[in-house]
Amino acid sequence: MPFAQPAAGGDPGSPGSSPTAARGSAAPLVAVCAGYFMVILDVTIINVAVPVVGRELPASLTGIQWITDGYTLVLAGFLMTGGALGDRLGNRRVFCSGVVVFTVVSAACALAPSAAFLVAARLVEGLGAALIVPGSLALLQEAYPVPAARSRAFGLWGSMAGVAASAGPLLGGLLVSTVGWRWVFLINLPVGVACLMLTSRYVAPSPRHAGRALDWPAQCAVVAAVALLTAALNEAGRRGWSDPAVLAGLGLTAPAVAAFLTRERFARSPALPLRLLRARATSGAAVIGLLFNFGFYGMVFTASLDFQHQRGFSALETGLALFPAVAMTTFASVLSGRLTRRTGDRPLVTSGMLLGALGLAGWAAAGPDAPYPLLVAPMMAAGFGTSFALTGSTATVMGAAPPAYSGAASALFNTTRQIGSATGVALGGSLLATGTGTGYGAGLRTSMAVGALAYLTAAALAWWCVPGRADAGGR
């Protein structure tokens, strides 16, 4: 896959030894995507292992839930902090620090002697992940300054999420059934070591903005807001939306957000300047990310439950059944990266969202007992459409942010996507549990219909906020 050669004026160094020598190659992309893949894989690979973990350690139901949810809560809550640290200390330094933390703590998870130890290790692992994700996009922004190459890199980066999320249950089921649940964490070790070596060798050092102080009050407010919201959404899928704990979490989120916005308005060195949030491209593309993650991960979650609980598929068979959606994410990311130079981002994001809406609407129309072959095309449409739109929306967010705030912009985009995923899973779980009063199949169809509506909303928003070819020419 060709990537544009780096612009002149890079850091001095001999060819083959300086990281800047590889800026025109695919090596930085492989390094960054390895770290991002590892982070997203750990969100889903654990799901099929926790029942076995609960028996062997042993763990209570609450402990099992925290093994899964503790990681995602810390990841979502500290993304903005990770982005701010990357902008201040250098994105490569923070990214590599996150990889080291994640890899070492993965080994600790694998060696966990008790459930309490494993929960604590998962929390720290989530912190390492929160340092990796914002820097991953910022490093690609720096490594591929030419728009066409950068779009292809963003596309492949985005496809990693779909591949990792969908491959998690398949790989987890395979590992648990052969070598044991501890290998769910040990598999991260060679990936983490390879990622660190590739990043150190082929990714150029990032600029630092050490004069910009970290806005700790704002960081604490956003951690509280995102953690409360994510926790409430996670619990809503299990307890229901009217549960007091869920209502309390949702209610406390609002003042935390208000505190963050108030602090950012008056701070001398804001973590996320409000002018970026007011920018149509930044805020609009972030909302689009929330909506397509809501639709796609809601589909993956409800489809997984349908395949296992209604159709009797094993975890391994479920992973294979979801493969058509996964395969489309990689193909669509490559295609969108190549087309964006000719069309601009707006047509790709809009058409991708419309295709995703068509796919989920087709699933809803197929009925609750539709044979699996009829569901392949809807899954492929949703996977293709989401990945097709991800490239352009990512480029829109990153292109609208000044270089000094690339980590913060990446963190904003990934935070909204994480919230979208949590919301899609929570709503899908609630609809399946209640069946909207008429049964499981009706809940499944309603979940797909709501996901289709989210895609349609994202398509309309994309036409309004994503730059067209003429607008994006200078990016």
Image: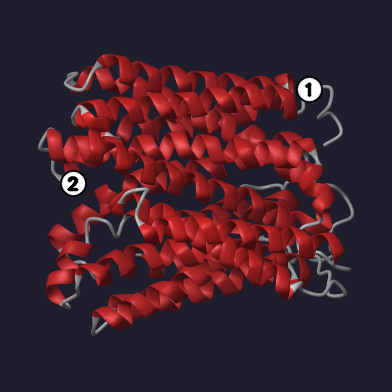
The circle on residue 336 is: none
User: Residue 299: image x %, image y %?
Assistant: 36, 34
User: Residue 306: image x %, image y %?
Assistant: 21, 35
Residue visible at 35% across and 43% down? 166
User: Residue 334: image x %, image y %?
Assistant: 55, 31
Quadrant placement of the C terminus: top right
Tell which circle, 2 or 1, labels the residue nearer the N-terminal end: 2
Residue visible at 34% across and 39% down? 428
User: Residue 25: image x %, image y %?
Assistant: 66, 48
**Horizontal side of residue 317 vs 298, given as left or right:** left
**Which residue is under mark 1?**
469
**Which residue is under mark 2?**
315
Q: Nearer the viewer, residue 451 or 159?
A: 451
Three-letter code, disc 1:
Arg
Q: Are marks 2 and 1 in contact (CB under 8 Å)?
A: no
Residue 370 occupies quadrant: top left
